[in-house]
Amino acid sequence: MELLLIRHAEPVRIPPGAAGGGPADPVLTPTGRAQAGRLAAWWHPGELDLVVTSPLLRARQTAEPLAARQGRNPEVIDGLREYDAQADHYLPVEELRERGDDRWLAMVEGRWEDYGGEHPGTFTARVCEVIDGLAAANPGRRVAVVCHGGVINVYLAAVLGLDRHLWFEPGYTSVSRVRVHRSGIRSVVSVNETAHLIGRRDGPAPGTGGEGSGP
């Protein structure tokens, strides 16, 4: 089977304290909605067997047009939420990096609990259990998993045997593919695909001869 790990589209910025005391759960920007539309249009109807999503709004709003294009409803899975889902703010990673903000250093160094996040080990165990469970329950299928940068990072790191939790920056609506054999062997096929943001696909849907169906 094939897992498509998809980062959500661009969300709005929520500075600390602006969420009214609760967890920040940003919606998509106009640019993000356009990105989600291009992602959905890239896949021919019938190419995806299942679309699942994190419960957070930025992921759900990315998944909805993709699932609609496939003629189905997205399935919300709580275990796909990001490690900082309870934080009272949402600041773009690129902003934190450019400013040299301590939140950026905490992300890189694994000090996620300093800013309301989960412990990296707890988060990784949750993510791997959920995604591996999806793979085991869907043999021979192609499953789109709309989630978050941290989720994608730790799962791919686990597949590749890396000892870093956050080791690359997935682009908004980027697609990273993992092939899972019926034996349980996992292989990374691609990382950070963004062709749908700059191009289009023409011609009939692939897969009629077994292409993309997965082992």
Image: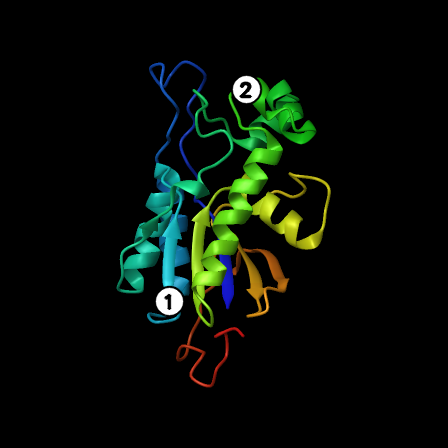
Can residue 149 be seen here? The reply is: no
Measured along the vertical axis of the image, is residue 136 above or below residue 147? below
Find numbered disc 1 in the image and state the secondary structure of the residue it sits on: loop
> Does residue 59 appear left or right of residue 126 in this picture?
left
Residue at the disc numbered 2:
115
- Judge by depth and name the residue closer to the eye, 89 or 137: 137
Q: Is residue 118 above or below residue 37?
A: above
Left-right relation of 132 to 69: right
Inspect the image, locate mark 1, and give the three-letter code of the amino acid beneath it: Asp
Residue 108's spot in the image, x, y percent? 67, 30
Q: Count residues near mark 2 (Cα–Cα under 10 Å), then give few for <14, some for 14-19, many for 20+.
A: some
Q: Amino acid at mark 2?
A: Tyr
Query: Mark on residue 194?
Result: none
Which sits in the foreground, 197 or 133? 133
On the image, the x and y values in percent for residue 145 come to: 44, 53
To which quarter of the image does residue 186 belong? bottom right
- Measuring 43% from the left and 65% from the top, which residue is drawn there? 138
Figure check: 25 above or below 198: above
Q: Position of residue 206 (x, y in %)?
A: 45, 78
Callout 2: helix, strand or loop? helix
- Which image quarter: residue 204? bottom left
Of residue 37 and residue 212, the one placed in the foreground of this image is 212
What residue is drawn where x is 51% and y is 31%? 92
> From mark 1 to mark 2, how far is it between C-alphas?
37 Å
Q: Are marks 1 and 2 in contact (CB under 8 Å)?
A: no
Which residue corresponds to mark 1? 49
Give the total number of marks visible in the rendering.
Answer: 2
Q: Quadrant of the C terminus?
A: bottom right
Image color mode: rainbow
Q: Earlier in the sequence, mark 1 or mark 2?
A: 1
